[in-house]
Image (cartoon, rainbow, N blue to C red):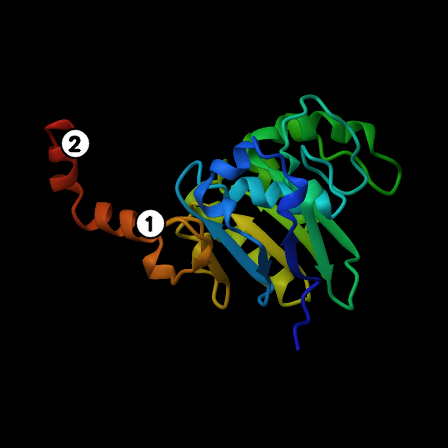
Amino acid sequence: MNHQLIQKVVINWEKIGRDSYLRDIEAIKGLEEIAFTSPITFFVGENGSGKSTVLEAMAIACGFNPEGGSRNYRFSTYDSHSELCEAMRVVRGFRRPGWGYFLRAESFYNVATKEEDYVDALHPSQRFHEKSHGESFLAIAQTQLKPNGLYFLDEPEAALSPQRQLTLLAEIDECAREESQFIIVTHSPILLGIPGARILTFDSGQVHDCAYEETDSYQVTEMFINNRRQILTRLIGRA
């Protein structure tokens, strides 16, 4: 039996305009549904493949602010999300999340600024702007990731060193074992290595399962580490 908070999402293409750019994204234009069978699901693929577009639509359809934050956040500095969220139906499981968070690397500055508007005696400000970018991202993991939560993370590794990515990996794994669910867009070969996670790639024209060793993140990193001098010589003429 599937115990995930989100069982699947279904897309009704009749609610998407005929001239919508969504119909030009190869992996999305034929997508009717995505089922979620693992507590951790990764979306991978080349830039522009549609993975962040789907993640964003899912988060909005689940009640999160388009620019990120918890479901308590309601603000807008720039309306850029697609119409996909309006055509998406979320099929939920029998459990309900006790908490949740939508982390977007590209709009985190806006969330960090607005965070100060949502503080109270029980929820003091994390003072994100007084921390480094990486420290702020890690603070999110340490304060917002809780058991029985629903989390959408878009490139959470963006500000993190490799060591801090390992810390985040451990935080995600522990939280997932406590009945939380994660849908994560990432290019990090470190995060992708979480045992038991399902990896869906948006490359090759359709969304499909992908083994860890088959991801570009793993293959390119491995190739560079093992053949650094040859690759640099070919790219820039010196090593």
Q: Residue furthest bottom?
A: 1
Q: Nearer the viewer, residue 71 or 36?
A: 36
Amino acid type at mark 2:
Leu
Residue 69 % position (x, y): 71, 38
Left or right: 154, with 234 as reference point? right
Q: Residue at x 73, y 36 (%)?
A: 65
As measured in the structure, the alpha-carbon distance from the residue carrying label 2 to the one carrying label 1 is 18 Å
Please give the residue where the numbered disc 1 appears in the rendered image.
216
Residue 63 % position (x, y): 76, 44
Residue 233 % position (x, y): 11, 34
Q: Nearer the viewer, residue 61 or 131?
A: 61
Amino acid type at mark 1:
Asp
The relative height of residue 37 versus residue 144 in the rendered view (above or below) is below
Q: Residue at x 77, y 53 (%)?
A: 99
Secondary structure of residue under mark 2: helix
Label 1 neighbour load within 10 Å: few <14, some 14-19, many 20+: some
Residue 106 % position (x, y): 56, 30
Left or right: 153, with 122 as reference point? left
Residue 156 visible, this angle: no
The relative height of residue 229 versus residue 41 in the rendered view (above or below) is above
Label 2 neighbour load within 10 Å: few <14, some 14-19, many 20+: few
- CB contact under 8 Å: marks 2 and 1: no
The quadrant where residue 153 appears:
top right
Secondary structure of residue under mark 1: helix
Please give the residue where the numbered disc 2 appears in the rendered image.
235
